[in-house]
Image (spheres, rainbow, N blue to C red):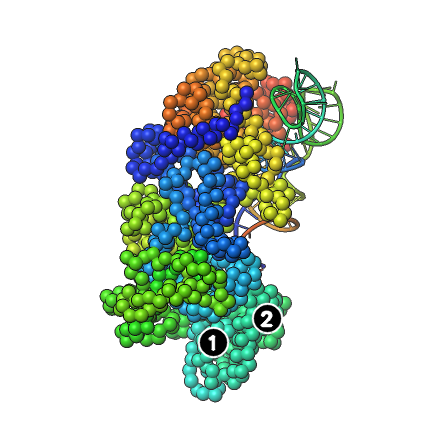
Amino acid sequence: MFYDHRKIEKKAQNAWVKSGIYKVRDKVKRKDLPAGRQENFYHLVMFPYPSGNLHIGHWYNFAPADVYARFKRMSGFNVLSPIGFDAFGLPAENAAIKRKIHPRDWTYKNIAFMRKQLKTMGNIYDWSREIITADPGYYKWTQWMFLYLFNRGLVYRKKAPANWCPSCRTVLANEQVVGGQCERCSSAVIQKEIEQWLFKITDYAERLLGDLNDLDWPEKTKAMQRNWIGRSEGANIKFEVKCQRLNVKYFLDVFTTRLDTIFGCTYLVIAPENPIIENLKLKIENFDEVVRYIETAKKKTDLMRTDLAKEKTGVELKGIKAFNPFNGEEVPVFVADYVLGHYGTGAVMAVPAHDERDFEFARKFQLPIKQVICEFYPEPKCPILENAFEEDGHLVASGAFDGLSSAEAREKMAEWLEKNGAGQKTVNYKLRDWLVSRQRYWGAPIPLVFCEGCKKQVEISNFHPSAGGPISKSIQNSKSKIPNSFSRGELLNPGWIAVLEKSLPVKLPDIKDYLPTDEGRSPLARSEKFVKTKCPKCGGAAKRETDTMDTFVCSSWYYLRYTDPKNLKKFADAKKMKTWLPVKMYVGGAEHSVLHLLYSRFFTKALYDGKFVGFKEPFLSLRHQGTILGSDGQKMSKSRGNVVDPDVLVKEFGVDAVRMHLCFMSEYSQGGPWNPHGILGVSRFLQRAATLISRSQPGKNGKAAGQAGLPAGQAGDKCPDRLLHQTIKKTGEDIENFKFNTAVSGLMILFNEIENRSYLKIKNRKLIIKLLAPFAPHLAEELWRKFGGKKSVHAEKWPAYDKNKIIEENFVLVVQVDGKMRDSLEAPVGISRDEAEKLTIARGNVKKWLEGKEIAKTIFIPGKLINIVTRR
RNA sequence: GCCCCCAUGGCGGAAUUGGCAGACGCGCACGCUUCAGGGGCGUGUGACCGCAAGGUCGUAGAGGUUCAACUCCUCUUGGGGGCACCA
């Protein structure tokens, strides 16, 4: 018998739509759901980017995730499993420009098509909750989020070298630069000085790091975030700087994690960006040369700076000397681009004997190399260094600190620093602030205006003497001193005024000329109608900010919106959020390990601090699907011609076969190459399952009880019953653990057994259809109705297994002699050591192996094996 | 360079967490089926020796711990991912 997937899929899907079975209600207790724990369960998949087509990767993400969602639902949870579109962003805009279509038209056309494709999957999405981030009703709240952060003092404007992609003609966040190249178009990224808006994610570094520990996330993902945050403990040291021309004292702060090596410091290096260069302008004898060096360094792209890593460059600041606070030694100061301006203090103490980079530099510039760490102590003579010894060891030539281990020395030296006012312990992070402004059209406008009048107001309020300078800590901390009229964001960014909440959204104008510009200005700047506005604070003439937001801002809070997608007054109702959030299970690609997942965590924490949400982490559990490769083992791409089109597969094999095969083909987080024949196995299985369930008597191919070589009673009755209950247990546990492949194989084993040894008992038929339901929801529905199910099988409760029926009476006792398997026999489960020993030793096989040997001992593992060990 | 992960038949992958390696599926081989082509069913399928019973070898390689290692430890090789002059 065959089932025609085309007919039953349409039929089932129409029935689901008609009955509204997947409509999600906020109420915890629902009569139309299977009785159970009646808990709400928020299950989320990463919403797709409307690229134009649902590809197999989307299917691999969404189909097994839907198996999980359906299982949770049948287990009695009120499941929210929503879907939407991450619709703003560069790729859509670029694609639209290429086709000479307006980005909005392109995006919404794609969404319409992909929505249709998504609906054919038959997942339990509640389409009434769909969100599109490019809808004004959505980005109104993206803008609200921006202002929320702005008003909390977490947004600031900075003119600084930014990652500029010349092809996309916009700046990029650090996270979007991969190996010195643009993440999207692979152009070499250059540094360009532009005024930019940044989010102070670094304020949250410690919490973003610490809270990772409690998350049920893949360890690898957590490790990547830890790595990205890059916490390192060390010390800041003040080096006194003296100039030969003028006798003025300066101090230069350096950061080091290897304070124990300070007696080996033979020079200092500062980054080209370090402001001390400008400050000491008049004292540097070779200032022209230094400036020339800095200019060339600036011109280098990140890529070049990395590529040229092997050849160190730099220039000495002539006429300047620094003094080591520990021993008063005088050391030269260099500027070199191997020191980064944005990390630590932008200056390092160079210890060539114990740092590879310093070693190279010292070799090139013929600077002294002084060893202060030896592997052992006391050591008569430290070996001559051929390269830097970077490990910890024991101190030598370090005055009072000689003999200490590196770890001890770091402690003692830090104490010394603090006592002598020459520095202190410090923690540094690699994490940098999140650059969110984009000079592009297709994004949410930044809801700020610039007002000259208000700028003066802020400046005379003397809270911020140096407008545009570094953020003053005192302002952030002086809550009481902030005048009512200006928010913290407005004080930190003089002249920048928040658009009133009631005026949101600041609509993205429908301009014709949306092409990006070369000079680093947003296309919106060309629209006078958009730019010209009134200041919401003073009513005077003002200009709108014309940059738009990075799309990652849109996706940093979307999971909140699904709980209340139509709300006009709030981004989501607090009660509704409490009902659903945080997300219990989040499923999506590992490529978002840092970007999206880190940003979302940051947003959640910021909202938590303002008591807008009651939780600190957005996603309690996280699972990644693997990547499906082409059958050639390569990444799928049109140019390679190895793309697998899910629509074609669905047409041929049906939705159920495709989703079940995706479950079965690999370990879920692994992915792997696509085997074009593989899906046949699952397709055959479903056909066979349909046939087996449909027959109530032993069929033509089903053997009657007893024929499989088992005692009649056992084969016909107990055995499949036991296996059935074992399978219920296994299937549930496997789905819970995202082991979809073994869950499917368990079902296959059950059906093989039903086919070979027994016939399906009527009372078990419905039960078995339920086991099939999460994997093959359409077929299960069809069979369910066919055999008298009145409502949907998806409103049924997941079957409970009978503990007593799982228990085996007998087991196969493995018999080993000296650790090698020599025999096996069926034995009752409760067999004792003595009984087992007696039974096994008497057996011919075992006797043979024990001949002429003396038994030393026996190892007995109840229910498993017995190992007879002979004297050797 | 640093960090993380992985390595099991011709292929995808199982293995109750130290206890029968290779479940389940693909593929392949042979057979059956009034079956014309990618259908259905049955049997077999890690390698080697053997008609068989059975035996030897076998989880990238080399050591080690253990009565017992795919599983734990050390080293080596190969592959994947992340970070990358982060002081």
* C-alpha gap between disc 2 and disc 1: 24 Å
- Disc 1 residue crowd, few under 14, some 14–19, many 20+, Cα 10 Å: many
In primary-sequence order, the first of circles 2 and 1 is 2
**Left-right relation of A541 to A163:** left
Residue A776 in percent (x, y) is at 48, 30
**Left-right relation of A21 to B5:** left
Q: Which residue is mark 1?
A: A324
Determine whether A735 is above or below A479 in the image.
above
Q: Which residue is mark 2?
A: A312
The foreground one among A628 and A723 is A628
Residue at screen point 48% across, 51% down: A106
- Disc 2 residue crowd, few under 14, some 14–19, many 20+, Cα 10 Å: some
The foreground one among A461 and A319 is A461
Chain bearing tag 2 is A
Image quarter of residue A647: top right
Residue A638 in percent (x, y) is at 60, 47
Chain bearing tag 1 is A
Residue at screen point 62% across, 49% down: A639
Residue at screen point 51% across, 63% down: A169
Please tell me the numbered disc located at residue A416. none
Residue at the extreme front of the image, as rendered: A512
Amino acid bearing label 1 = Asn
User: Which element type, helix, strand or loop, lies under badge 2?
Assistant: loop
Disc 2 vs disc 1: which is toward the camera? 2
Determine whether A834 is above or below B70 in the image.
above
Amino acid bearing label 2 = Lys
